[in-house]
Image: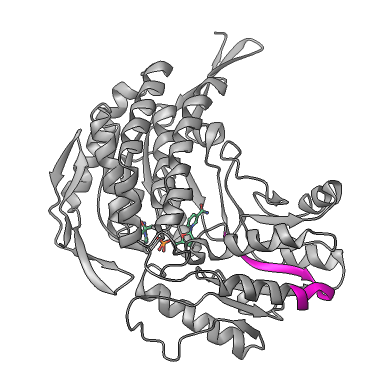
Amino acid sequence: MKHAYANHYAEGRFLPSRGTARMPVVDPSTGVEAGHVASCSTEDVERAIGSARSGFQAWSRSTLDERREALGRLHAQLSARADEATRLLAQEIGCPVWLGGLMQLPMPLKGLELAIEAIGQIDWEERVGNGVVERVPSGVLAAITPWNFPLHQIVAKVAAAIAAGCTVVLKPSEVAPGAAMVFAEAAHAAGLPAGVFNLVWGGPDVGEQLVRHPGVDRISFTGSTHVGRRIMAAAAEGPKPVTLELGGKSAAVLLEDADLDAALPAVLRMSMANSGQACVCQSRLIAPRRLVPEIRRRLQDGLDHWPVGSPLDPATRLGPVATKAQFERVQAMIRRAVAQGGDLVFGGASPDSEARAGFFVQPTLVDGVTPAMELAQEEVFGPVLALMPYDDERQAIEMANATRYGLSGAVWSGDADRARAAARQMKTGQVVINGAPQNLATPFGGWGWSGFGRENGRFGIEELLNYRALHGA
Ligand code: NAD
């Protein structure tokens, strides 16, 4: 049955969307249209912003306990919908249910728990000499999100806003509407006060209307660097502050003494999970030249046992990429990597660039990648790992830093001090040392082309607060 997303959410209720555009939702496993989203009209968006503005009057004065309770109810409602969200992510973006259960759902739920905790970690009021410095909600937030980890990206913005006393108009990606609808239904069932959370549907036009609208006070955007630039330019008219969480070209740096048994499976997971469609995907493996033959052999073996198939099958580790455009882009990048001298070790582009039955890209490993090559510089957003041999540690760090992006990275070494010293030289917002578990309470965000501003925990809430200094208070 085709799924129609016909309603948006404003004033605490679901309302029919009255735009003229009908955006198809395509099942990437088959390439067949599985539903559609009715976009919002200009008036619908106007009404949602009005809803957020009037909601702000009350929510900005809510107590910290009221915010904690609202987030707690949202957590309960979202948990109850976890299975539905996992299934929709498989059908709409091709994310294997394995990863849905491992990350796509646990991350937003943890994000909500951390936002609740973080409310108590913020200095809402601080005495400075004869003054009091208050931290106050900054207003109506326009949250614009992508499709790859859609529920996590929505929660990162909306939970921080609720905790900060702000209200939100969310414009999620038109590619993955199911996750956003599950979130809206959870927010409704959680009984959030009318106007605190609002959802509009649409593409770039609706996004731009939000960014330029005087009723919107600040923007939080996650998506491509290209669109991030456009959003920043449009926001400059306000001027209004923007948070940009953009693309990445993250490197895993393997030092000579790294434990290959631990490192290589972790690098494979971080490069292939979600078909490489993660902003923090470790798409470059920088490895000692001496170890490259062994590393190639082990990675090849790992990829050979990396099951590709239907995202609804619990055994599948690699589903299709999310869209036809993504499929064609990844195929073209693999071909150019080989044309530029890359040594194709595993996988590769399909014999023709047409997606026959679904947008499946083979897991791919290219060796001999040098910093000048496109594969070392441009985000692929596909299951493609570039192996970059180095001769000494200084060169390894130089290679890791030789991109305009700076979102994430990893360092592996048998010596914890040596690993930390290398990590401290990485020009990037986060570095994972020896496969440490993800810590969602730390600030998340990028340097350079990966954007600016921070999300998660206390840091994500502080991003949405303004200072007010009361002299003589
Ligand atoms: P995208 O930039 O194409 O779109 C993101 C969102 O912006 C969508 O909701 C889209 O409709 C909207 N949009 C597009 N043009 C707009 C405009 N002119 N004005 C306002 N809104 C507009 O990105 P995508 O293809 O959905 O996602 C993939 C990209 O997101 C990758 O580059 C990836 O690295 C990046 N990403 C970054 C992070 C991070 O936290 N740093 C996380 C996930 C994904």
Image position, residue 97 (x, y; %): 40, 56
Residue, x 24% and y 40% (percent of image)? Answer: 185
Left or right: 410, with 413 as reference point: left
* Along the viewing direction, whichever of 230 and 145 lies nearer the viewer: 145
Examine the rendered structure and indicate whether residue 266 appears above or below residue 375. Answer: above
Question: Residue 344 is drawn in which quadrant?
Answer: bottom right
Image position, residue 65 (x, y; %): 41, 16
> Does the segment drawn in magenta span residue 283?
yes
- The residues colored magenta run 281-294
> Does the segment drawn in magenta span residue 57?
no
Image position, residue 285 (x, y; %): 69, 68
Left or right: 353, with 11 as reference point: right
Examine the rendered structure and indicate whether residue 212 appears above or below residue 110. Answer: below
Picture quarter with ligand 1: bottom left
Which image quarter is the C terminus in? top right
Question: Residue 1 is drawn in which quadrant?
Answer: bottom left
- Say whether residue 249 is visible: no
Residue, x 81% and y 73% (percent of image)? Answer: 291
* Along the viewing direction, whichever of 401 and 238 lies nearer the viewer: 401
Question: Residue 375 is drawn in which quadrant?
Answer: bottom right
* Along the viewing direction, whichever of 110 and 215 lies nearer the viewer: 110
Residue, x 45% and y 71% (percent of image)? Answer: 308
